Image (cartoon, rainbow, N blue to C red):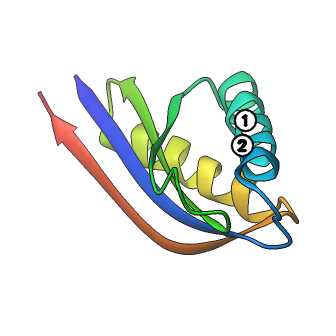
Amino acid sequence: MVVGALNLTLYIGGMKSLKDKRSVVKSLLTKVRSKLNVSAAETGRQDEWNRCELGFCCVTNEASHAESILQSVINFIDSDGRVEIIDSYSETIHI
């Protein structure tokens, strides 16, 4: 079994409140979960208006498949015009 984990730090421009930020983050997480079938959550920077930290996870039987799924998450979020990826870290773990 292979677990793929991805951590993204995003910049969200034009936010005037945490409520605005939560709306964008919730929308992103819902879309990623439904389109790419991964677990997803906001994992940090909840009190910052213009930044967020998101975590994603998948389980598969091959490392290359896990890496492909995580790259799809990066590509999907990168294509969303509301956010900019500042930092990313991914890891695959063989269990």
Residue extending furthest toward the bottom: 86
Q: Are marks 2 and 1 in contact (CB under 8 Å)?
A: yes
Q: Is residue 2 left or right of residue 51?
A: left
Q: Is residue 43 left or right of residue 61?
A: right
Residue at 25% across, 30% down:
2
Q: Quadrant of the C terminus?
A: top left
Q: Residue at x 73, y 64 (%)?
A: 78
Residue 75 drawn above or below residue 26: below
**Amino acid tagged 1:** Lys
Question: Nearer the viewer's eye, disc 2 or disc 1?
Answer: 2
Q: Position of residue 9 (x, y in %)?
A: 51, 65
Determine the secondary structure under disc 2.
helix
Q: Quadrant of residue 28?
A: top right
Which residue bears the numbered disc 1?
26
- Toward which corner of the image does residue 86 lie, by quadrant? bottom right
User: Residue at the location (43% across, 49% down)?
Assistant: 67
User: In the image, residue 26 lies at what x, y percent?
Assistant: 72, 35
Above or below, 46 relative to 32: below
Q: Residue at x 61, y 23 (%)?
A: 37
Amino acid at the residue labelled 2? Arg
Please state, as top left, top right, bottom left or bottom right, where the N terminus lies in the image: top left
How many residues crowd around disc 1 within 10 Å: few (fewer than 14), some, or many (20 or more)?
A: few
Q: Is residue 15 left or right of residue 58?
A: right
Nearest the viewer among 45 and 70 is 45
**Residue 31 is drawn in which quadrant?**
top right
Total numbered circles: 2
Would you call the spot at circle 2 few (<14 residues within 10 Å), some (14-19), or many (20 or more)?
A: some
Q: 79 or 19: which is nearer to us?
A: 19
Numbered circle sitting on residue 22: 2
Cα distance in 3D space between marks 2 and 1: 6 Å
List the single residue furthest toward the left: 95
Q: Nearer the viewer, residue 1 or 75?
A: 75
